[in-house]
Amino acid sequence: MVERMSQLALLRPVKARKKAAKRGPTAASGRLNQGFTFLTNHSHVLVSLASVPGITLRQVALNVGITERAVIAILKDLTGAGVVAVSKRGRQNHYKINPDVPLRHPIEQHKTVGALLSSILGTRQTARAR
C-alpha cells in the first residue's frame, strides 16, 4: 500500500510535490501535519515565561521558533494587557504572570490565563510562575 501511495505521489506535478515537501509530513503518512498548532505564538511565549520566570528572550525565541524581535513585540502585548509583569533583578529580567486575567476572545472569556497555563503545564508549574 505504501508503494502504491508513493507511486501516486509521483503522478502529481513537480510543483505540487515540492509544495507538499515544504509542508512536511501528512496524516496519510501516519505522522501529524506540522502546518499548524492549536495555540498562538502569544500563548507559546506565555507558557515559556511561566515555565521559567528568569528565562531569556533569546531562549523563549528558540523554544517558540520565532525571532527575538517577535518575542519582544508579543511581550509588549502581554504586558500591555496586564498578563505579564516584568521586573529587573540585577542584569536579568524576571517575568511574573497574572493568572487572574481573563482570556481575550469572546469564546474563551469565561476562562483565565491561570486556567490555560494549568491545563498546559499542570498546577505545580503555574504556582511557581506566580
Image (cartoon, rainbow, N blue to C red):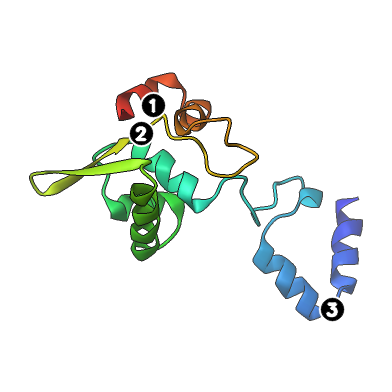
The residue lying at 37 percent from left, 57 percent from top is 71
Label 2 secondary element: loop
Label 1 secondary element: helix
| Residue mark closest to the camera, 2 vs 3 | 2
The image position of residue 48, as x and y in percent, is 39, 42
In the image shown, does 25 or 67 lie closer to the viewer? Answer: 67
Kindly identify the amino acid type of the residue bearing the numbered disc 3.
Answer: Pro
> Is 94 situated left or right of 67 in this image?
left
Q: Are marks 2 and 1 in contact (CB under 8 Å)?
A: no
Kindly identify the amino acid type of the residue bearing the numbered disc 1.
Answer: Thr
> Is 79 situated left or right of 114 in this image?
left
Q: Is residue 5 above or below residue 91?
A: below
The residue lying at 47 percent from left, 46 percent from top is 44
Kindly identify the amino acid type of the residue bearing the numbered disc 2.
Answer: Asn
> Is 35 situated left or right of 100 in this image?
right
Disc on the earlier residue, 3 or 1: 3
Whole-Å distance between the Cαs marked 2 and 1? Answer: 10 Å
Residue located beneath label 1 in the image? 126
Rendered-image quadrant of the C terminus: top left
Label 3 secondary element: loop
Q: Are marks 3 and 1 in contact (CB under 8 Å)?
A: no
Residue located beneath label 3 in the image? 13
The image position of residue 110, as x and y in percent, is 58, 30
| Residue mark closest to the camera, 3 vs 1 | 1
The residue lying at 59 percent from left, 44 percent from top is 105
Disc on the earlier residue, 2 or 1: 2
Question: Label 2 crowding class (10 Å Cα cut-off): few <14, some 14-19, many 20+?
Answer: some
Disc on the earlier residue, 2 or 3: 3
Question: Label 3 crowding class (10 Å Cα cut-off): few <14, some 14-19, many 20+?
Answer: few
The image position of residue 36, as x and y in percent, is 64, 53
